[in-house]
Image (cartoon, rainbow, N blue to C red):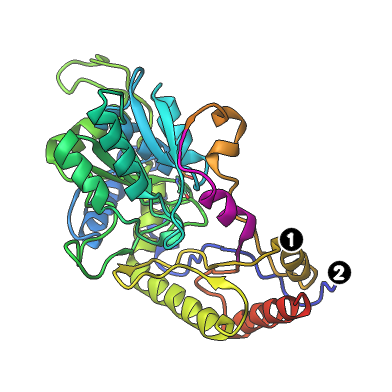
């Protein structure tokens, strides 16, 4: 190991704004728990930043998904279609509800759920009188919006509800076409975001539900606070959860949100520099469809043999990683129904994620690029 050069992690939070000041305010006022002014402010300003929605701050992105899926109709005896190439939390949140899963393969252009394939399968099932999903949970993987229009058609024709897993995609949206100008998480019935340490912004840990409908948001708030009755003390009208965000977390989240435009442009600059330098190599670069504005959360490439590249980077103190093994390969989901096969597996076999922290300097970007280019050229 050459340990001299400073370590370049995959994605680290940057906490250089008002985080300290706002947390100090929580400590000074004693509002450290699940009630407090920062929660409301964070919800309000977050809603504004995604172009308007009714928002409910949660303890995690997974908690947000769980509640949103339940409100969308997922439960015992129901079916939820989920992208198979995603972080396990997307599938787990659906499994918590008791629903059965359909794991939908990816398409190669955006690496997201093949919504056309799912569309055709649902139409076929409906015509044949077979069961089809009550809810589709579509992930905007690595911050690139999914091709959601076929799902809107399913909602229109069959009442299929849509939950967008936008955990990695804060700041992303559609740039052209019928959804131009819309932010991810505001097109389906519910959109869910994550503020885990490595996401676009962090609150230490946390999530957000964005609902298009005010009544739905009120129900979500109710479920995240133990389904507590507003009229009668310690009275709970259904099984709820302790899923609310704390004021301390919201204080950090708000300070981070203030920096979102800067973080987004930093991620864009990193992606542009990586793109320009990797163009001439025999690697496929991160998707960027002309109709999409990605968040560029984590820059990833496809190469025929990821492990030697990851090892070579590790020797230079640079962290690179593979993507998640698809959900249909994970032990709890081996018997789930699969829609389509092969693309998610192939992406998983070839993908490598490169350092993408917002404060990654150009010198460090060039260090990464140098190693990637050398290693790939050596392997040819
Ligand atoms: C991070 C992530 C989640 C879960 O969010 P947490 O805040 O860690 O619970 C869900 N889905 C995807 C795609 C994620 O990347």
| Residue 37 in sight from this viewpoint | yes
Sequence order check, earlier mark of 2 and 1: 2
**Residue 215 percent across, percent down from the top left:** 13, 35
Q: Is mark 2 within 8 Å of ligand 1?
A: no
Quadrant housing the N terminus: bottom right
Toward the viewer: 122 or 344? 122
Circle 2 crowding by C-alpha within 10 Å: few under 14, some 14–19, many from 20: few
Q: Report the side of 67 relative to 297 (left or right).
A: left
Name the residue: 49% across, 47% down.
86
- In the picture of the structure, the residue carrying the numbered disc 2 is 1
Whether 10 is among the magenta residues is no
Secondary element at image label 2: loop
Which label sits in the foreground, 2 or 1? 1
Quadrant housing the C terminus: bottom right
| Residue 60 in sight from this viewpoint | no
Name the residue: 60% across, 36% down.
330
- In the picture of the structure, the residue carrying the numbered disc 1 is 307
**Residue 353 percent across, percent down from the top left:** 59, 63
Toward the viewer: 153 or 260? 153
> Which residues are the magenta region?
338-353
Residue 127 lies in quadrant: top left
């Amino acid at each position: 190991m050459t340990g001299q050069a400073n370590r370049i992690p995959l994605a680290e939070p940057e906490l250089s704004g008002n985080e300290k000041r706002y947390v100090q305010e929580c400590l000074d006022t004693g509002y450290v728990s699940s009630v407090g002014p920062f929660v409301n402010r964070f919800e309000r300003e977050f809603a504004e930043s995604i172009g308007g929605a009714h928002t409910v701050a949660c303890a995690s992105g997974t908690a947000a998904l769980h509640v949103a899926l339940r409100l969308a109709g997922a439960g015992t005896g129901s079916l939820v279609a989920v992208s198979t190439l995603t972080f396990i939390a997307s599938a787990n949140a659906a499994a918590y509800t008791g629903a059965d899963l359909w794991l939908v393969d990816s398409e190669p252009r955006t690496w997201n759920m093949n919504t056309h394939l799912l569309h055709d399968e649902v139409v076929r099932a409906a015509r044949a009188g077979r069961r089809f999903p009550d809810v589709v949970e579509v992930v905007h993987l690595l911050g690139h919006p999914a091709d959601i229009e076929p799902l809107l058609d399913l909602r229109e024709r069959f009442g299929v509800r849509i939950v967008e897993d936008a955990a990695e995609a804060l700041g992303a949206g559609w740039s052209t076409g019928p959804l131009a100008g819309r932010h991810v998480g505001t097109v389906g019935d519910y959109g869910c975001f994550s503020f885990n340490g490595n996401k676009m912004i962090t609150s230490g840990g946390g999530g957000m539900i964005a609902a298009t409908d005010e009544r739905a948001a009120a129900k979500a708030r109710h479920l995240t606070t133990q389904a507590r009755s507003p009229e009668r003390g310690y009275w709970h009208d259904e099984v709820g959860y302790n899923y609310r965000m704390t004021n301390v977390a919201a204080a950090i989240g708000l300070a981070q949100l203030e920096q979102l435009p800067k973080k987004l442009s930093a991620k864009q600059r990193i992606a542009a520099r990586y793109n320009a330098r990797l163009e001439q190599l025999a690697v496929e670069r991160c998707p960027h469809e002309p109709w999409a504005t990605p968040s560029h959360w984590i820059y990833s490439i496809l190469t025929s043999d990821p492990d030697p590249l990851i090892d070579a980077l590790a020797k230079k103190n640079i962290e690179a990683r593979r993507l998640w093994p698809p959900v249909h390969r994970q032990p709890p989901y081996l018997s789930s129904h699969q829609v389509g096969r092969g693309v998610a597996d192939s992406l998983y076999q070839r993908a490598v994620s490169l350092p993408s922290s917002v404060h990654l300097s150009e010198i460090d970007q060039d260090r990464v690029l140098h190693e990637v280019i050398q290693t790939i050229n050596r392997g040819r």
